[in-house]
Amino acid sequence: MEHQPAVAWLTEAAASAVQQHGTGNLLRVVLIVMFLGCALTAWLLLRGYKRKDD
């Protein structure tokens, strides 16, 4: 089994997804990952501002 760089593997996976299912599924996956990333980033940032003022 050959070693493939991550970028080449990702490009090949995206190209095959577009060929098999059209752009709809690829766009859906990109949007889901984007929203999850934004939610995780917001959670991490807001967690840092939380203080206990007891």
Image (cartoon, helix red, strand yellow):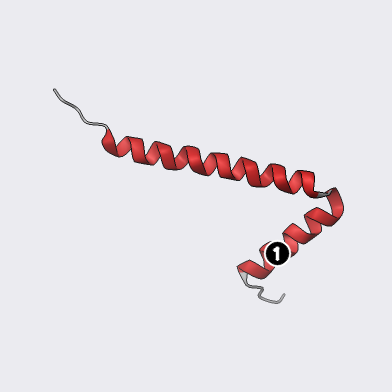
Q: Quadrant of the C terminus?
A: top left
Q: Nearer the viewer, residue 4 or 36?
A: 36
Q: Residue furthest left?
A: 54
Q: Secondary structure at mark 1?
A: helix
Location of residue 49 with respect to 22 vertically, above or below: above
Residue at 78 percent across and 44 percent down: it is 24
Q: Position of residue 41 (x, y in %)?
A: 43, 43
Q: Position of residue 21 (x, y in %)?
A: 84, 48
Residue at 62% across, 67% down: 6
Residue, far right: 20
Report x, y in % for residue 27. Answer: 71, 46
- Position of 22 with respect to 38 (left or right) is right
Q: Residue furthest top?
A: 54
Q: Say above or below: 5 vs 44.
A: below
Q: Is residue 45 left or right of residue 33?
A: left
Q: Is residue 54 above or below residue 31?
A: above
Q: Residue at x 40, y 36 (%)?
A: 43
Tell me where residue 29 sits by quadrant. Answer: top right
Badge 1 crowding class, 10 Å Cα cut-off, few under 14, some 14 to 19, many 20 or more, is few
**Which residue is tagged 1?**
11
- Amino acid type indicated by mark 1: Thr
